[in-house]
Amino acid sequence: MIIEALAIIGFDPDSEKAIENLRKASDILRKEYSVKLIIVPYNTWNDLFTATLKSLPTIYLGGRPAFIGRTPSVEEIVNYVIKIIKEKYKGGESFIPAAVYSNEPLFSAALVEA
């Protein structure tokens, strides 16, 4: 199974830690649960005005807003992914990208046509 993790990040230590925790969670999910977590970082470094208005880091897992304005621990990420798999898993399909789930223009760069 493949799940997308869209991380909207800024130029700050919390955003860096969020990406690091997503990588560690990805390794655990792959090794222990055979789940591939695809991490898609979306940085707002060039848009400082908009970045200051948003709560960063913001992490979407499987197209759902999961963690907003804080850095989740590795365990929180793994537990959240397992929870959404149990709730939504139907026949092995991949979870939709956040760009398809939300109509926000911010996600247009992550949109993938199927």
Image (cartoon, rainbow, N blue to C red):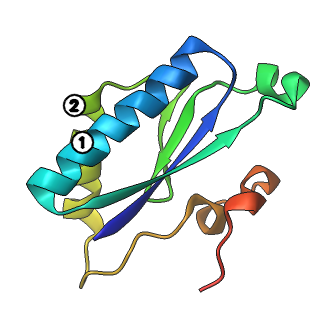
- Where 27 falls versus 88 (above or below)? above
Secondary element under disc 2, as helix, strand or loop, is: helix
Task: Describe residue 62's horizontal placement relative to residue 90 as left or right.
Answer: right
Query: Which mark is drawn over residue 14?
Result: none
- Can residue 103 be seen here? The reply is no
Q: Nearer the viewer, residue 16 or 69?
A: 16
In the rendered image, the vertical position of residue 38 relative to residue 17, given as above or below = below
Coordinates of residue 62 in the picture (x, y in percent):
43, 59
Query: Is residue 78 shown above or below 85?
Result: above
Residue 75, disc: 2
Looking at the image, which residue is at 51% across and 39% down?
Answer: 59
Q: Quadrant of the C terminus?
A: bottom right
Identity of the residue drawn at 79% across and 19% down:
52
How far across and how far down the image is residue 90, in percent?
26, 80
- Which amino acid type corresponds to the residue marked 1 in the rendered image? Val
Label 1 environment density (alpha carbons within 10 Å; few <14, some 14–19, many ≥20): many
Q: Are marks 2 and 1 in contact (CB under 8 Å)?
A: yes
Q: Residue 61: percent from the left, percent from the top?
A: 43, 51
Q: Quadrant of the N terminus?
A: bottom left
Which amino acid type is marked by label 2?
Glu
* Residue underneath mark 1: 78
**x then y, percent, for residue 42:** 67, 44
Q: Which secondary structure, mark 1? A: helix
Q: Decide which of 26, 99 is in the foreground and name it.
A: 26
Q: Is residue 86 left or right of residue 107?
A: left
Res. 45 image quadrant: top right
